[in-house]
Amino acid sequence: MNMWRRIRAMGLWHELVLAGLLAGLLAGAWYFEQTRGAEFVSWETQTALSSHMWEMALLSVPLTLIIISGGIDLSVGAIMSLSAVTMGLAWQAGMGVWPAVGLTLAAGLTAGAMNGTFVVFLGVHPLIVTLGTMSAYRGIAEGLIGAEPVSQFPAGFLAMSEPLVAGLPPAGILFVVLAIAAGVLLGRTAAGRELRAIGYNETTARFSGVAVARTKLLLYTASGLVSAVAAVLFVARRDTAKADVGAGLELTAITAVVLGGTSIFGGRGRIGGTVLGVLLLHEVRSLVAWRWNRDELTFIIVGAMLILSVLVHSVLTRRKS
Amino acid sequence: MSPRSVLSRLAGREAGVAALWLATVAAVGMVNPDFLRAANLHAIFVKCAPVVIVACGVTLVIVTGEIDISVGSLMGLLAVAGGIVTSPDRMGLSPQAGAAAVLAAGAGIGLLTGLLVTLGRVPSIIVTLGMLTALRGLTRVLMGGRWIESIPPSLRVLSIGSTLGVRNCLWVAMAVLALTVVLAHLTPLGRRIYAVGSSPRAAALAGLSSRRIKVFAFAFTGFLTGVATLAGQLEVGTIEPDIGQGFELLVVTCVVVGGTSIRGGVGTVIGSALAAILMMTIGTALVFLKLGASASYWERAIQGAFILLAVLTDQLSRRRGTGEDTL
Amino acid sequence: MSDVLVDIQRVSKHFGGVRALREVSLAIAPGEVHALCGENGAGKSTLIEILSGSCRPNAGQVLLAGRRLGLGNVGACEQAGVAVIHQEPVAFGHLSAVDNIFVGRELTLAGGLLLNRRAMRRGASELLADLGGGVDLACPVRCLPPAQRQRVAMARAILRDAKLLILDEPTASLSERETAVLFALIRRLRNQGVSVLYVSHRLEEVFALADRVSVLRDGRLVGTRLAGELDRATLIAMMVGPEASESSRLGGDGPAPGKAGEALLEVSGLTRRGAFEDITFTVRAGEVVGLAGLVGAGRSDVARALGGVDEPDGGLVKLAGEILPGGSVRRAIAGGLVLVPEDRHRQGLVLPMSVGANLTLSVLRRLTRMGLTRPARERRMAGRIMGELDIRAESDRAAVSTLSGGNQQKVVLGKALAAKPKVLVLDEPTRGVDVAAKAQLHRTIRLLADRGMATLLISSDLPELLSASDRVVVMRAGRITGELTRDEATQERVLHLALPPDRANTEGGAS
C-alpha cells in the first residue's frame, strides 16, 4: 500500500505498466516455447537477437533528453548515415581505421552542432530544422558515396561487435553506461532539472537565469555525437558503410522514447521509461520475427503500441483532471 | 512591420519559389537544351502530380496547426488495397470497386487519424508517426510476401492514360489543386481552417468547432492520398513492397518550402504546389546537367538545403521586420 | 421583465481555495451603460468570463431577456447575444479584418457553398465606417494598431446583434481622440438599446459614461448605485473598503533611519530602442521606489532590461557600485539583482514542477556538490522560504499548479529571494492575488526593505504603489517624466505625469 502510494507519487505507473507488459510477454513466450523445444527466452537467443538493437538504443538516450527539453531530432538516422559514409570514405582513402573513427565522430559532432545552431540562434522549430537537415545529411551521404558501399574493414575494427562482458558487445555496454549517465544527469544534476524546466516552460527558464541556448546547443551536439558512435558500431557490426545506414531509425527511436512515457510536448519523461520502451519494442519485434518469422507484423504492433500508449495516457490524465 | 510588407511577404513566397523554378529551368536549359523539350517538362510535371495532390491536403492539415507524416505509408497501403481488389490473381473485382475501395479506405483512415488527434487528444505527430509504421506493416501483411501483379489497365487509366495529349494524372492534379484553392479561399470551411490554425483560443471564443475542422482536414488528406494513388502510383501494373516510402517527408518538405508555417494559420496550397514542382525539377535537372553519373545522388541534399533556406529567409525577414521576441 | 435585460442571480465561483465570486447578484437594464468597478482581484474578470461562457460558475444562474444563459458554453452565450471586447482583443492574427468579423457568420453564395466575398467586404467596411473607420480591410489584423483591432472586435459584436456588450478596459491603449470616438459609439449603441457592461479602472470614464455603477470587492457585490448619486471619494471608498484601506497603509514609514544611504541600484541613461529612452534613477538600500505609468509606458520593458532578459542599447546599470553588463539573467542574478516578472504563469513559474524545484530553479547550481544536486539541502532551503513567506502548499513536493494564485505569486517571490538579492525588481507582484495574500505581500516587501533590500516596484494599482513606495518615478511613453517624494506623491500628481499632456489637462480641469 505504502509502496503503491510511493509509485503513484513518483508517477512511476507508466514504467510499471511497461515492465509488466515486458514480463508478461517474456513469460508468455517462455510458456508457449516450453512445448516446442525452441527457446526464445534463453540467454543465447536473447544475446543473439539483441545485437541489432544497440544502435537504436543508443540514439534513444540523447533523444529522450532532447524531447524532455521540448525539442525533437529527426536527423539522428541521417547523421548515422553521414557518419558511416565518412567512415567508409576515410578508410577507403587510406586513412588508418582509428583516425577514421575520430574523423567520423567529428563529423557527427559537427552535424549535431549545426542542428543546435539552427534551433538556438535562428529560433526555428526543431521539427522543421531536423526535417531539413535529415534530408540534407542523408543527401550529402548519398552524394558523397554514390552507389558503391565500402567494406572490408580490418579485423581489429570489426571485433568491436563481439561480445565483451556478460554477452554484451561494446555497444550494449555503452548503452548501459550512457543510460545511467543520462539518468543521473536528469535526476541528480542542476543541468537535468534545468533542461526539464526548459521543456515545461522555456520562458520561465530564461527568466530564471537558465542558460537555455547553451543547454539546447549541447543537447543537439551530443545527439550528433552519439549518432556517429552508433554509426561506427553499425559499420563494425556489418562491415559495410553506405548511405542507407540508419534509415528509419529516427522514427523507431522516437517511438521507443514516447512509448517509454516521455511527453512529446516536453517536460515529462525519464530515462528508465526509455530503457523499458527500447526493451519492449525490441522484444516484441524479436518475438514476432522469431516465432512467426514475419517482420511485417512487428510494424503494425509497434505503430499501434505507440498510439495506444499515448492514447491511454491522455484518457487517464483527462479523467483525473 | 507595416501591413504592406507582410502582404508582400505572404505573396512573396509563392513568387520566390516560382522565380527560383524559372531560374532553374532556364539555367539547366542553357547547359542542355534537351531539358527544355516539351516531353521532358511534361515528364517532370507527371512526377509532380501525386506530390501536388497530397500536398493540397497536408497543407490544410498544417494550416490547422497539426501535421501528417503518414501519407507515404497510406499511399502504399492504398495502392496494395486497390491492387488486391482488382488483380485477377487476387480478388479480381471490377476497377470501379477498386477505385472506390482506394478512395474510401483513404478517407476512412484519414478520418481515424483525425479522430485520434481530436477526440483521443493524441498529438498528431505521434498518431501519424504510429500510422506511418503500422500502415507500412499492414501493407506488407496484405501483400503476403508477393508482389501484386497484373493490375487491370482500367484501374490505371488515371495514371497511364492521356487526354488532349496531356497525361490524365496532370488533369487530376490540376483539378484537385483548383478545388482545394476554392475550398481554402472561397468557402466558409476554408476560412475556418485558417481561423482555427491562426488562434485556437479565438476560434473557441467564436464558437468554431476546431475538432470538426481538423477531422475534416485529416479525412480530406486521406481521400486525396487515395486520389494520388490512383493517379500516380499505378503506372506499371505491379506493386512493390516499399511503395510510397519517404513520400511523407517529401510532401512535408514541399509544404514547408512553399511557405506554410508549422505553427499554423499561414500558408497556401499554391505555394506547396509550386514548391513540389521546384523539388521534382531538381532531380531531373541533375541528370541533364551532365555532371557525371553520381550527380543525381545529390538530389536529396539539395532538397534539404531548400528547407533550411526557406526557414532561414522566413526567420530573417521576421526578425528584421518586428524585432519582437518570438520565443 | 422589460427593464431587466441581464439578471445575474447569486453567482459564485471558486478556484481551488480562492473564492473569486460570492453570491453576486446584478441586474443590467436594456440600453444601459453599467460600469463594473473594483480593485484588481475583486472578481471583475471572473464575472466577465462567466458571462462570456468561458468559465462555469459553481452556483447561481444568469438570465438574459428572461431566458437562462447557457453558462460554461461560449457558443451558447454568443448566440444569446453576449459579446466581450477584451483589453487585448483576441483575434485571428493572420486573417484580415473582413475575415475576423465574419468568421462563423460568413455570408455565402450558391446555397452556402461559397463565400460571398464582395458582400462581406462591403458589410465589413460599412460596419467599420460606422465605428470610426480607418481600418485596413485587407491586411492581417495582427499588424493593425490596438484601436483598429478593437474596432474590428466591436464590428464582430455588432454583426452578431449583441444585446450585451462587455468592454474590458477598452481605453487602456487608446489615444485621447480614439477614446472620444469610442465613447460616442458607446452612447450611440446605448441609444439603440444595447446594454454595455463597462469595466475600467479609470474612474473619470466611469463617471462620464455610466448610468449605474456596481462595485465588487473581494468577490462580493458591495452595491449598485446611480452614477449621478456617486462621487469619486464614495466610489473609491466602496472599492477599497474600510479594512483594506487601513491594511494598505501598513508599513510605508519610509526607510528605517540610518539604513538608507548606500545606492544599490544606479541606472543612468538606460535605453532600448522602441521601448524606453534615457532612463535614469537610483534606488538605495532600504528603499522601495515605485515605477508608475500607464500600460505601455515601458515600465515592464525597463524591468526586463534590468533583470537581464532584454539587452539594452545604451546606458549604464550599476549594482552596489559595480557595473552590471546587460543582457544576461545569470549575471544579473549573480550580481544580486533579481526580477520578479509580471506574468507568473508564463514567465515566473514552471507550473507542473514542484514548489521546491521552482523555489530553487535560479540557484540550483549553487546548491550542488561535485555537479550533483543535494535534495536534503534543497528541501531545507525550500522549507525555510515557504515558512518565511507563509506559502501554503501540501508540501514542497506539490506541483505549483495546485496552489492558489496568491501562493503561486509567493513562490515567484520566494524564487527571487532564494538568490539572496540586494536589489529586487517587482513587476506587478500582486496582480490577480486575493486580498489576504496581497496584504501579506505588502508586508513582506516592507520587511525586506527594512532589512536593507533596494526594491523597484511596478504596479498598475496606483493606491498600492503609493502606499508601498518611499518614492515614485513616473514614466510616460518610454521616458521618465518626473520623480515624486513620498509626501509629494498623490494619485492626481502621478496621473498628471503619467497621462499624455492634453488628457492630463482636461482631467486637471475636471477635478
Image (cartoon, coloured by chain):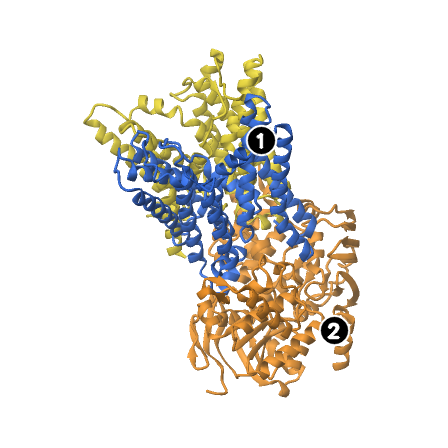
Chain colours: A yellow, B blue, C orange
Q: Chain of mark 1?
A: B
The residue nearer to you, when weighing C322 against B73, is: B73
In this rendering, would B275 be left or right of B212? right
Nearer to us of marks 2 and 1 is: 1
Is label 1 in a helix, a strand or a loop?
helix
Tag 1 residue: B35
- The subunit letter for the residue under badge 2 reads C
Spot occupied by residue A65 in the image (x, y as percentages of width and height): 51, 38
Q: Quadrant of residue C70?
A: bottom left
Q: What residue does disc 2 label?
A: C490
Indicate the amino acid at tag 2: Thr
Q: Position of residue C97 (x, y in %)?
A: 60, 64
Q: Is residue B201 left or right of residue B321?
A: left
Relative to B89, C476 lies left or right: right
Residue A212 can be seen, yes or no: no
Judge the density around disc 2: few (<14), some (14-19), many (≥20) Cα neighbours within 10 Å: some
Quarter of image, res B230: top left
The C terminus of chain C - image quarter: bottom right
Looking at the rendered structure, the kind of residue marked 1 is: Phe
Question: Share a chain, discs 2 and 1?
Answer: no
Q: Secondary structure at mark 2?
A: loop
Residue C29 x %, y %: 52, 84
Measured Cα–Cα span from mark 2 to mark 1: 80 Å
User: In front here: C246 or B90?
Assistant: B90
Q: Residue at x 59, y 35 (%)?
A: B305
Instruction: Give the crowd class for mark 1: few <14, some 14-19, many >=20 residues within 10 Å.
Output: many
Q: Are marks 2 and 1 in contact (CB under 8 Å)?
A: no
Q: Residue at x 64, y 83 (%)?
A: C234
Tell me if residue A294 can be seen.
yes
